[in-house]
Image (tube, rainbow, N blue to C red):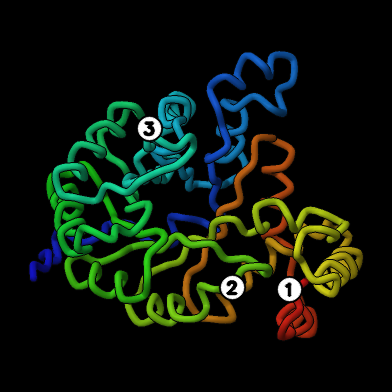
Amino acid sequence: MRRTEPALTSVLDPAAFGRQGFGAMRLRDDAVSEAVGDPDRDPLAVVHAAPDAGVSMVDTADAYGNEELVGRAIRSRRDEVVLASKFGLVRTEDVAGDFGVRADAAYVRQACEASLRRLGVDVIDLYYLHHRSDEVPIEETMGAMADLVAQGKVRALGLSNVTADDLRRAHAVHPVMALQERWSVLDREIELELVSTAIDLGTMIVAHSPHGHGLLHRTDASGSGIGPGLMTSLAEIAAAHDVTPGQVALAWVQHRQQVHGIPVVPLPGTTRVSHLRANLAAAHVVLSRSELRRLDEPGIASG
């Protein structure tokens, strides 16, 4: 098994990621023309609002179809942004909206070159495998990704949608800077094995979908599968802090860093400047121990 030399390991400091990132998954180029006259919904303005508000990490992926848009948006302020992208999901022709996984060494090289070209940059700060492969050993994938670091095309490596065993095996080849997984007060599967593994390896966690794919912005839980106890708790805690339930849900993810003693960067996504600013405001919401215990009660998230 190959292990990269120390000189090829990550050169990024976890502090460079800030307290919160910006997920660009939902941004689309065609929305630029649709947002004429509405700067709150202009995708370029949304991306610019991130560094304007002190958010350094901008996260995209080749599967999102918006790397060119993100690249244009950050071009004049590249030194202000920690740029993250992902590879590995490949659209299949037989099923609309469905994706397969490519993680072989040749595809790793091909995907990185294509992303660099679309983004219009010389280096990607954090490059993720977007989803584990059932066919290609993680060691092969990670070895090819480590070569990208050695070549100066990528600064640090990450994994997403993997198992704890995948994470350990990958880290044995090259340090895994970041693990990006779903984590919200509604979805805590990551806490079963991955969190403890990340702690052991010194891997930071980037928590995507901290609002439960938008469900935790709702005030009515009917039909959502969310337990009414959770919605009531979020609403009452929000009222006590004069914020929204969605901001409390995001603050809960922010507090995972203190609870678990590991760097955790929430990655909310939005298509509005105003929503981005509201998300960032949640970083200043300090939940008490009793409020955290209330949100952590067993079974509270179940419908």
Q: Residue at x 17, y 47 (%)?
A: 148
Front in this rendered view, residue 152 or 96: 96
**In the image, is residue 218 above or below residue 62?**
below
Q: Position of residue 16 (x, y in %)?
A: 43, 55
Q: Residue at x 31, y 76 (%)?
A: 165
Task: Name the residue that disc number 3 marks.
Answer: 93
Spatial separation of the CA atoms under disc 3 and disc 2 = 33 Å
Q: Please tell me whether mark 3 or mark 2 is closer to you in this view.
A: 3
The part of the image, by quadrant, that contains residue 212 is bottom right
C-beta proximity under 8 Å, tags 1 and 2 = yes
Spatial separation of the CA atoms under disc 3 and disc 1 = 37 Å
Question: From the image, which quarter does the N terminus lie in?
Answer: bottom left
Q: Amino acid at mark 3?
A: Glu
Task: Name the residue that disc number 2 marks.
Answer: 188
Could you tell me which secondary element the residue under label 2 belongs to? loop
Q: Describe residue 77's horizontal placement relative to residue 156 as left or right.
A: right
Spatial separation of the CA atoms under disc 1 and disc 2 = 10 Å
Q: Residues within 10 Å of mark 3 (few under 14, many from 20)?
A: few
Q: Position of residue 96 (x, y in %)?
A: 48, 34
**If you read the primary sequence from the N terminus, does the residue marked by circle 3 or circle 1 appear first?**
3
Q: Position of residue 171 (x, y in %)?
A: 24, 70
Q: Amino acid at mark 1?
A: Ala
